[in-house]
Amino acid sequence: GECWYDDCGGECAVHGLGPEYAKARPDGTPCDPGCECCRADGGCGECTSGHVCEFAGDYGYCTSCEAKFPGDDSLIEYCRNEAGDGFDWDGTHYDDSCDFDHGGGATPTPAPTTAAPTISVAPTMDVCPSVGESDYEGRTLYCFEAGGEIHNVLRVEDEQ
């Protein structure tokens, strides 16, 4: 059945998070700005709208779309609209949930020494003939202009 805030393991269970996540730390201090559900150590599990989750090790934290893509209004708008479902940009997956597989994703710290899956960035190629939507390898490719350059975003559906 459906879980709503107070049943099924806590108010953050609606995001698929375990009971260690709550709207505030156990001592009552709120989660960091942009974070909706955090652990006792402050690590975030779900970001608020308009934010994407990034990692330092297994410590999730939230970055606003404006701070992540400064000066790129169309990409900021795309981030705000798509962060809830997750999106890929420039070889990195962004999501407002911190529970996606972040192996090699938006992590600013060195990878652990244990063998972890690696993500190789595809070579840059001009796949956008013009601004708009087009079909690319069976997926929808979004092309838009920002800063005088044409950028492309290939939407990848959540494969959980």
Image (cartoon, rainbow, N blue to C red):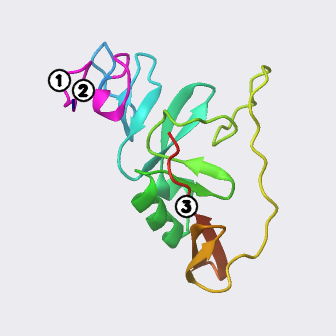
Residue 47, image x and y in percent? 40, 40
Disc 2 secondary structure class: loop
Residue 142 position (above or below residue 45): below
Q: Is residue 2 visible?
A: yes
Q: Pointers 1 and 2 in contact (CB under 8 A)?
A: yes
To which quarter of the image does residue 89 belong?
bottom right
Nearer to me, 141 or 59: 141
Dot 1 corresponds to which residue? Answer: 6
Amino acid type at mark 3: Arg
* Residue name at image x 75 percent, y 23 percent: 112
**Direction from residue 59 to residue 38 in the image, left or right:** left
23 vs 137, left or right, is left
Q: Quadrant of residue 40?
A: top left
Inspect the image, locate mark 1, and give the three-letter code of the amino acid beneath it. Answer: Asp
Task: Kindly tell me whether residue 12 is visible in this rendering.
Answer: no
Say how many tags the image has.
3
Magenta highlight range: 2-21
* Mark closest to the chain's N terminus, 1 or 3: 1
Disc 3 crowd rating (10 Å Cα; few below 14, some 14-19, many 20+) is: some
Residue bearing mark 3: 155
Q: Position of residue 75 (x, y in %)?
A: 53, 67
**Dot in front, 1 or 3:** 3
Depth check: give the residue in front, 114 or 137.
Answer: 137
Nearer-N-terminus badge (3/2): 2
* Contact check, label 3 and label 2, Cβ < 8 Å: no
- Residue pointed to by mark 2: 11
Q: CA distance from mark 3 to mark 2?
A: 30 Å
Amino acid tagged 2 = Glu
Q: Position of residue 142 (x, y in %)?
A: 56, 73
SS for dot 3: loop
> In the image, is residue 20 part of the stretch drawn in magenta?
yes
